[in-house]
Image (cartoon, grey):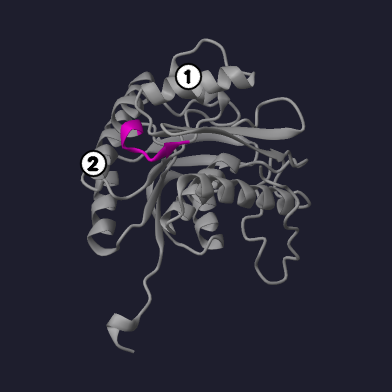
Amino acid sequence: MPQESLRQYTTVLTIAGFDGSGGAGIQADLKTFAAMGCFGLSVVTDITAQNTCGVFDSIALPAEFVARQLQVLSDDIPIDAIKIGMISQAATIRAIAEFLDKRPDIPVVLDTVLASSGGRAFSSDSSIQALKSDLIPLSRIITPNLPEAAGLAGLKDVPSKKTDIEKTAAILLIKGASAVLIKGGHMEGDFCDDYLLTSEYGKWISSPKIDTPNTHGTGCTLSSAIAASLAKGHDLLTAVKTAKAFTGDALLNGAGFRLGKGAGPLHHLYSLPGSDPLRGQRPIE
């Protein structure tokens, strides 16, 4: 077959931490990319010792080696979108920012992972400052949860009302973000209300909460699905809605499984033959 007639993969690169339990981090990202029809690439920033019960230890790779991974991949393979997750070192953040600064046409989704769901901090004060000054301005969208949004905005209290969440998103835009999706999964009630704010519009995107103990990697999955949708050329609002629907499906289809003693993973590959997927159960507004 002539080389010029071959199709090109739609590629998405994840720059994130390694989760040996397979539920979050790079492993969740790669499953999400595959499920959404993209070819996943990966650069490891941190290696964690974790399972479904929590993160017990982590080791950061040297910034120089992270930069080497990025350079080698980009020298060979075109990258259509990038998702960024856990980065614990300020030097690594700066190295990634230097890489991105030379590639402004690649859409970047930054999942501002500051701590594990169990409360283990991944970021020092210096790395959070580097995130704010060097990485957030280069991202197409950031996807903090409520505690992360409060921390990045410099607020003492975590917002709980919709009006407070809207004000927090506006602060993050003023501080340099191009677009913000504040995830409302921590809010009380039967619905998961996420707030998307850009310089052009603000929009609440709502869906019913899924009753499941298996939520490990939900944030990783959502941000990766946004990146995959952007890689395919969708506009930001469509990408967010598509990602939210996919994440809901993965939560729903993973609810009936058991893996480990703690919070299990989502079922990212629910659409594979033989999985009997449960789809279309959560309307997205």
**Residue drawn at point x = 31 percent, y = 26 percent:** 130
Say whether residue 15 is left or right of residue 193. left
**Span highlighted in magenta in the image:** 136-142
Question: Is residue 141 positioned above or below 239 on the image?
Answer: above
Query: Is residue 262 at all visible to an observer of this figure?
Result: no
Q: Where is residue 24 in the image (x, y as percent from the top left)?
A: 55, 45
SS of the residue under disc 2: helix
Q: Which residue lies furthest to the top in this view?
A: 156
Residue 151 - label: 1
Residue 45 - label: none
**Residue drawn at point x = 47 percent, y = 19 percent:** 151
**Residue to which mark 2 is pinned:** 101
SS of the residue under disc 1: helix
C-alpha distance separating marks 1 and 2: 25 Å
**Residue drawn at point x = 31 percent, y = 37 percent:** 138
Image quarter where the N terminus lies is bottom left
Classify 10 Å Cα crowding around label 2: few (below 14), some (14-19), many (20 and above): some
**Residue drawn at point x = 26 percent, y = 57 percent:** 74
Image quarter where the C terminus lies is top right
Question: Is residue 202 positioned above or below 158 on the image?
Answer: below
Disc 1 or 2, which lies upstream in sequence? Answer: 2
